[in-house]
Image (cartoon, grey):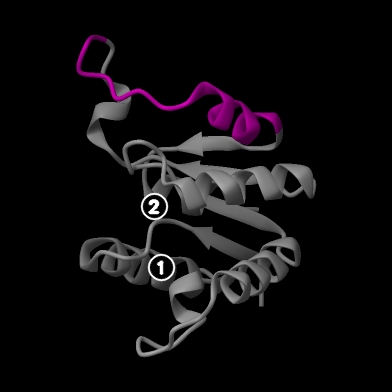
Amino acid sequence: MGKKIYWANALFSEADRRFNEVSVARVREAGYSVFLPQEAFTEDADPTNEEIFRVDTNELQSCDIVVACLDQFPIDTGVACEIGVAYGSNIPVIGLYTDIRSRRKGAGRMYKNQYVLGAIEARGEIVYSVDQLLETLP
């Protein structure tokens, strides 16, 4: 099995969970091991804040790379925290930004926090599709 990836994205709406499932399936098919936080607990589980933090942080700090989905507006707070933990742990991050507004130049461009983007760019890069992600992964 290839490098271990931590998949950081919002995971509470049906749309986000489905995007995660479909995208992670493609990454796994490419030979990578992926920790997807929404799979860590069963749907009927009621984990405490500390349990979620402990499980996710242990998995994140044992991975080779973090894929951080940036489509939420603003960037999901949990994802932003995971980017910070990755930076502090010297783990590279690939930001996945599939929103079509990412490439607009004018007023229609979606703002993303520059501090968070800087943390990604310091040790990684930003890609704009799952296809580009698969081309970029080591």
Instruction: Please give the name of the residue rendered at 37% of the width and 64% of the height, measured from the top-left corner.
Output: 11
- Give residue 74's position: percent from left, percent from top: 36, 36
At numbered mark 2, what does the secondary structure look like: helix, strand or loop? helix
Labelled pair 1, 2 in contact (Cβ < 8 Å): yes
Q: Is residue 125 visible?
A: yes
Residue 132 screen position, x and y as percent: 43, 45
Residue type at mark 1? Arg
Q: Is residue 92 above or below residue 65?
A: above
Q: Residue 26 has which mark?
A: 1
The answer to which quarter of the image holds residue 117 is top right
Taking the spot 69% from the left edge, 49% from the top edge, the residue there is: 85
- Span highlighted in magenta in the image: 106-122
Residue 32 visible = no
> Is the residue 55 above or below the residue 80 in the image?
below
Toward the viewer: 92 or 82?
82
Q: Which residue is mark 2?
A: 130
Residue drawn at the location 50% of the way across and 71% of the way down:
37
